[in-house]
Amino acid sequence: MEQSKFLNTNLTQVETAQKLVEELKPSIKELLYNVKRYDVPVSIVLFHSIKDVSSELDNHKRLTDVLDIIKIGGSYFNFIFLPFTNIQEAHSFVNYIELKVLHSEKSNCVVNELKKEQSNCLTFINSFLFGLTQQKEADSLPRA
């Protein structure tokens, strides 16, 4: 993978992570406040694709869910914040979206939970990018 073309963004992984942090910091801070104050679970789902799938995702999210769409280069990063949703429920949401909504679109997905101990947004966002990179590498391996 070329360093300058990380996930079709025309940026390095570090630059991509920094741009995502800059865009997502307000949402993360607000939801982190709720996690700490009210002790509610919040899961975050990232759908990464080359095509804009935000309208499909927006049509299937709940009223309390937050969708942040970030386009960098030729990539769309669709972060869905799922308040009051633990990690198992988030995986059910992902399965539904992948099977029923995005079945004909090529996208990769990473799920994570926002923890009250979370303090470093860059590390948190980088964990999503690392998950995407692992999926891309696994997809490129020959199947037996």
Image: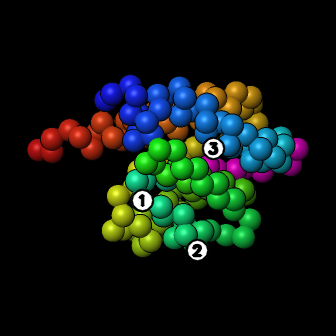
Which residue of the protein is positioned furthest toward the left in this rendering?
144
Instruction: Please name the residue shown 63% across and 44% down the image.
Output: 113
Which quadrant is home to the C terminus? top left
The image shows residue 53 at horizontal and vertical percentages of 48, 64
Residue 113 tag number: 3
Instruction: Please name the residue shown 68% across and 32% down the image.
Output: 121
Residue type of the residue flagged with mark 1: Lys
Q: Is residue 14 left or right of residue 120?
A: left
| Residue at the spot of label 2 | 59
Residue type of the residue flagged with mark 2: Asn
Label 2 or label 3, whichever comes before in sequence order: 2
The secondary element bearing badge 2 is classed as helix
Quarter-of-image position of residue 98:
bottom left
For the residue pair 69 and 112, the one nearer the viewer reads as 69
Which span is picked out in magenta? 37-45
The secondary element bearing badge 3 is classed as strand
The image shows residue 54 at horizontal and vertical percentages of 54, 64
Q: Is residue 34 left or right of residue 23?
A: right
Residue type of the residue flagged with mark 3: Glu
Q: Nearer the viewer, mark 2 or mark 3?
A: 2
Count how many numbered circles sit on residues in the image.
3
| Residue at the spot of label 1 | 51
Inter-mark Cα distance, 1 to 2? 16 Å
Label 1 or label 2, whichever comes before in sequence order: 1
Mark 3 surroundings within 10 Å by alpha-carbon count, few (fewer than 14), some (14 through 19), many (20 or more): many
Q: Nearer the viewer, mark 1 or mark 2?
A: 1
For the residue pair 31 and 53, the one nearer the viewer reads as 53
Vertical order, 88 against 53 (above or below) = above
Label 3 or label 1, whichever comes before in sequence order: 1
